[in-house]
Structures are given as C-alpha cells and as structure tokens.
Image (cartoon, helix red, strand yellow):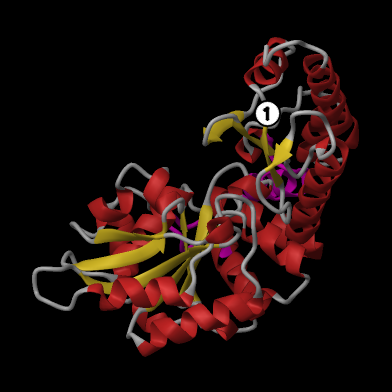
C-alpha cells in the first residue's frame, strides 16, 4: 500500500462539521489529495511550472475544452481575475460587469490595481446577469476622451447569486462585445457548477460562445488551492507569465498547485463534485421553500440558496451553531453547498429553519 493511501484512509475517518457559509470551507476531495500525494512521491521536479505534472494538466485542460489554449495557474481567484483583466486592458480602459460581480464587490480593487487603474463600470440586470442592452448602454454613454474607454466585458458564471447564463445568453453578450470591439472575460470560480447545471460541453459556454479568457475555479470544487487561467485566444496571453511572476503568483513548486487538478479532471470528478453540490442546494431549497417567513430570493440553479429569513430565525440558527453569510439586502442569507455536503446535513439545517420559522409564526410580533 503506498504511503498516500494510508493518509487517505485516515482522512476518511475524520469527521468534520459541515457548514453553509462557503464552499471554501470544504477540504480537498480524495481524488485531488491522492494526486497531490503522488506528485510528492515522484521525486525532484523542475521548478516554476516546467515540471511534468504541470505540463500534463495543461494538456488535459486543452483536451477538456477541445482547443489549443494557453493555461496558467495562480493561487486564488482574485489573482486569476485581476491578472486576466489586466492582460486585456490598459490603465485608461474600463471593464463592464454586473453590479454584484465578484470583481466589484469582493476583490478589494484587485482588477484596478493590477491593470494600473482600469475602471470598472457597473450595469444592472435581473438575477445577477448582464444583458447586451446594458452593455450597449454603457459603451455608448460617452465617447469623449475624458471617459475611460470600455475594453472588456466580465461575466460571472454562475453569477454571484447562483444563477446561470444559458448558451444563448452568452452568445448574445459575446456578439455585442465583438460589435463594440470588447474582449470577454469569464469569472468561473464555480464554472463546474454552471456546466453541471446546463448539461453542456464546457466548450459551448466558453470559446464556442465567444469567451476570450476563462478563470477556471478549482478551489471551490475540491482543490486545496489554485485556479487556472485559460486563454482561448493565445495572442492575449503574450508575456502573461511575466505578469504572474511580477504579481507574486508564480509558485516555485508549481506541481503542488497543478497536480491536484489531475484528480479533478480524471473520470470527470470535477463535474461529479459540482453536480452533487448543485443537488444538495436543490434539496435544501425543496425543504425550506414553503417554511413560514422564508422567501427564496433567486432561482436555485447551482450550489447556492439565497433565502430571506426574519432576524429571530437567523439569530436562533446561529445559536444552534449554523454558519452562513447575510450579505444580500435586509435578511437575505446565502446557504452554500459544497462537493462533500451530505444529505443528512442539509436535512438537519432545513429542519431547524422550518422549526424556528414555525415557532416564530406563532408569536404575536415579529420577534
């Protein structure tokens, strides 16, 4: 028995309390861990991404998307988005995205910093989605030299509220972008969940739909760390390796960033993990959608359930040990499922929500 198998067996016996605050909370999936440990057992390797593991993973990603693309690895999604957008824009350019896009709300100005000042222009749209009309409105708003010139569109797939762009929606956005000479970036932190939802080949919602560069998230899908940046237009990746180095994102022992991807890509583990997380979110939705005082805020298409709950329910859930984010409006809770979320954990949370909401419905006041 190889040493790494012993570690996996031990991991199987470790019980961890599952929560719903973020899919970042889940650990490594067994397949990713096995690949990581195999890379460690392989002896010395060339540093800085010239190792056999990294080259193998890049080839597997090219096979996955059925195209000859350039692939780079960074430590996290913020670096992936920021550096990818910086490669598309000069400092006097702007990036169009939805008002709740991650690059606007959760990346601490990273895209602006790494592009030396490219401005983010915000558009509204139902269910967290950009529309061609919204893009057109921002592009044509002004064309004078005092306004940062729109140069890129960034779509989040799935969106920050868990909804998914269809193939047709993405094609329409890309067509508008092409008409206005804009490049299209996709923030795919949970890209696997979108593919699992739509049931299409990953190429159909990326380069075949007109996407120029994808930030392919693995951390939320069972990896320990590390997201992939996939340039479908290779000319856009010119000198990109220098950006990665300058930004402090070039791992010297790159094989430990890239090798776990093999565990995800082999036998479509990445898709299985995402499909399971989506299924757990749908299970949770089905069990709480009719609870008193609970109002589901967005369609449940991937691994997140956004539900509005009264303050007394939220407080009592926290008192019972549940963790979740409340960042959407007044009382909006994000309940995020992971690749390893168990049906039993979902059912326990759903039972607590239903019970507490039911108790509240018998109160004279809002509690």
Q: Which quadrant is home to the C terminus?
A: top right
The relative height of residue 294 versus residue 244 in the rendered view (above or below) is: above
Tell whether position 36 is magenta: yes
The relative height of residue 270 versus residue 277 in the rendered view (above or below) is: below
Q: Nearer the viewer, residue 358 or 58?
A: 358
Residue span colored magenta: 26-52
Residue 317 rendering spot, x and y as whole percentages: 72, 17
- The furthest residue to the bottom: 179
State left or right for residue 115 relative to residue 333. left
Q: Let me know if residue 5 appears in the view.
A: yes
Residue at (59% x, 29% y) in the render: 331
Image quadrant in which you'd find residue 159:
bottom right
Tell whether position 194 is magenta: no
State left or right for residue 304 relative to residue 175. right
Q: Which residue is mark 1?
A: 309
Residue at (46% x, 77% y) in the render: 132
The relative height of residue 285 versus residue 156 in the rendered view (above or below) is: above
State left or right for residue 109 relative to residue 53. left
Image quadrant in which you'd find residue 90:
bottom left
Q: Nearer the viewer, residue 140 or 68?
A: 140
Q: Which quadrant is home to the N terminus?
A: top right
- The local secondary structure at tag 1 comes to loop
Residue 38 rendering spot, x and y as whole percentages: 70, 49
Count how many numbered circles sit on residues in the image: 1
Q: Let me know if residue 251 appears in the view.
A: no
How busy is the neighbourhood of tag 1: few (under 14 within 10 Å), some, or many (20 plus)?
A: many
């Amino acid at each position: 028995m190889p040493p790494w198998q012993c570690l996996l067996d031990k991991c199987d016996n470790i019980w961890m309390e599952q929560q719903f605050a973020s899919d970042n909370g889940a650990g490594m999936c067994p397949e990713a861990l096995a690949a990581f440990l195999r890379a460690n057992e392989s002896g010395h390797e060339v540093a800085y991404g010239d190792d056999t593991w990294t080259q193998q993973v890049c080839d597997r990603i090219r096979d996955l998307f059925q195209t000859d693309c350039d692939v780079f690895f960074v430590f996290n999604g913020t670096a992936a988005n920021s550096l990818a957008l910086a490669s598309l824009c000069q400092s006097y350019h702007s990036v169009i995205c939805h008002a709740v896009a991650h690059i606007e709300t959760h990346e601490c100005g990273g895209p602006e910093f790494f592009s030396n000042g490219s401005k983010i222009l915000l558009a509204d749209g139902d269910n967290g989605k950009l529309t061609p009309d919204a893009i057109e409105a921002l592009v044509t708003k002004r064309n004078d030299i005092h306004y940062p010139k729109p140069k890129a569109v960034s779509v989040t797939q799935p969106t920050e509220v868990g909804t998914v762009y269809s193939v047709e929606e993405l094609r329409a956005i890309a067509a508008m972008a092409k008409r206005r000479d804009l490049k299209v970036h996709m923030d795919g932190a949970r890209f696997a969940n979108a593919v699992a939802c739509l049931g299409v080949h990953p190429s159909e919602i990326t380069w075949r739909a007109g996407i120029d560069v994808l930030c392919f998230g693995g951390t939320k899908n069972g990896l320990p760390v590390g997201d992939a940046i996939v340039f479908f237009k290779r000319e856009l990746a010119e000198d990109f390796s220098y950006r990665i180095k300058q930004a402090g994102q070039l791992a010297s022992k790159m094989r430990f960033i890239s090798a776990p991807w093999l565990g995800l890509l082999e036998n479509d583990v990445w898709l299985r993990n995402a499909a399971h997380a989506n299924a757990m979110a749908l299970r949770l939705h089905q069990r709480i959608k009719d609870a008193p005082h609970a109002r589901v805020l967005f369609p449940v298409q991937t691994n997140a359930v956004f539900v509005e709950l009264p303050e007394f329910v939220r407080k009592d859930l926290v008192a019972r040990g549940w963790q979740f984010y409340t960042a959407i409006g007044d009382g909006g809770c994000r309940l995020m499922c992971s690749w390893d979320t168990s049906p039993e954990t979902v059912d326990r949370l759903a039972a607590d929500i239903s019970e507490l909401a039911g108790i509240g419905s018998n109160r004279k006041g809002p509690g």
